[in-house]
Amino acid sequence: MAFWNKHKKVAVGQVVSKLQMEQVKSDIIINSIDDGVVLIDAQKIIRLFNPAASKMTGWNQNEALGLDYKSIMRLVDEKNNPYREDQDPFNRAFTEASPVRDNQAVLVSRSEKFLSVTVSVSPLLDENKAVIGVVGIFRDVSEERTQERQRAEFISTASHEMRTPVAAIEGYLALAMNDNVSKIDSKARGFLEKAHASTKALGDLFQDLLTSAKAEDGRLSNHPQVLEMDQYLEQLTQDLRFAAEKKALTVEYMVGSGGAGTGLIDARDGNSKVIAPIYYVYADPDRLREVITNLFDNSVKYTDSGKITIGLTGNNQVVQLYIKDTGAGIPAEDIPHLFEKFYRVDNSATRTVGGTGLGLFICRKIIEMYHGRIWTESELGKGSTFYINLPRLEANKAAQMKANQPTDVLPEIQGATKI
């Protein structure tokens, strides 16, 4: 028995020693990395604060421990406006119980210095999936953002300057092809038509470059208002369906209820009216139209047969829009990069239809302006679905905001019938 107890004590000691070694390793890693690391418990109190976090925030480790994280992790946007609760990545990780990443945050240090950072926050869940804390990692990206702004300013200036001569060339080519202005033979007309098409494509590229530059530095015009998404999407589907019908594609509008992507209850042909959930969001109708039109046009481009579905669903917190097609699909390795600037899937389909590689990047930047999320799910040969999640406005709040909203900025579809 003594022999057994002796070996049991040795085994327990080895386990304890091993755990202590693992703890030491973790401490070494956390304390040596350049990224700030903060652990926050369920009461929003800081329980871990590494040296990098101390250096970036200006708060001593011993001072920060035990304090409410909001007094230490002061985040503002690029215009120095303090983050609201629905913007704060730490608060979002607590409420959404899912990882949150913010690439646009600015950290205000203890000495009132402003530091551009990226913030990644992951929730810690217990066996019941309840959030018991979060781990935040933040990185100083001030130099990178300065370089990005310089590149964006160059692209913006160059694009703006080049649009004028390109527009002039396009105009002169149009005049040359006008029978009332000039007489040319069929061969010359063919050359001019090709030149005109190429010039138009070049003009579109410059416009996309200019839009992407404005989206990056916050200069993109934005006039948000209360939108009732069922009316808005139903009207927009009617406007978009003609492009798909030219390729003999079927277009349908679907309204759902319940969680994201589930509970579809209604398919409309544009004439029927049904009782549907009322989903309010706060966004610029023109910018949202730009996003949905871009996604819809892409679906038309890459779908040779079948149908395209524009859908609406949601829950108490989120309004979800989606555009689903029966097209070629997207390779799995390309999906994580689709919304990056200038990224294009390299296959025969994309080489055939062309494009700038900026459309989805611009879509992402627009959706992020409204604190939303855009992503895609796809399978080769079976089509793609692009999802957009936007924060949902409560009906009472939407009514209050709409009452204070000037009547001349209400969307044209506000008078659409709904029963």
Image (spheres, helix red, strand yellow):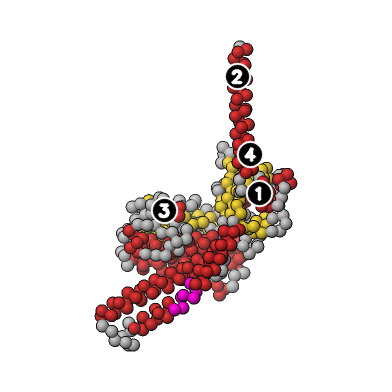
For label 4, the residue is 27
Label 2 amino acid? Lys
In-front residue for pair 71/265: 71
The CA span between labels 4 and 2 is 29 Å
- Viewer-nearest of labels 3 and 4? 4
Q: Residue at x 45, y 63 (%)?
A: 358
Dot 1 or dot 4: first in sequence order is 4
- The local crowd at label 3, few if under 14, some if 14 to 19, many if 20 or more residues have their Cα within 10 Å, is few
Q: Is residue 134 left or right of residue 207?
A: right
Dot 2 or dot 1: first in sequence order is 2
Dot 3 or dot 4: first in sequence order is 4
The CA span between labels 3 and 2 is 53 Å
For label 2, the residue is 8
User: Percent position (x, y) of residue 284?
Assistant: 53, 67
Q: Residue furthest top?
A: 1
Marks 4 & 2, CB-CB < 8 Å contact: no
For label 1, the residue is 53
Q: Residue at x 62, y 16 (%)?
A: 6
Dot 1 or dot 3: first in sequence order is 1
In which quadrant of the rendered view does residue 129 lie?
top right
The residue range painted magenta reads 159-165
For label 3, the residue is 334
Dot 3 or dot 2: first in sequence order is 2
Q: Examine the rendering and report whether any part of residue 211 can be seen.
A: no
The CA span between labels 1 and 3 is 34 Å
Marks 1 & 3, CB-CB < 8 Å contact: no
Q: Residue furthest right?
A: 63
Label 1 amino acid? Ala
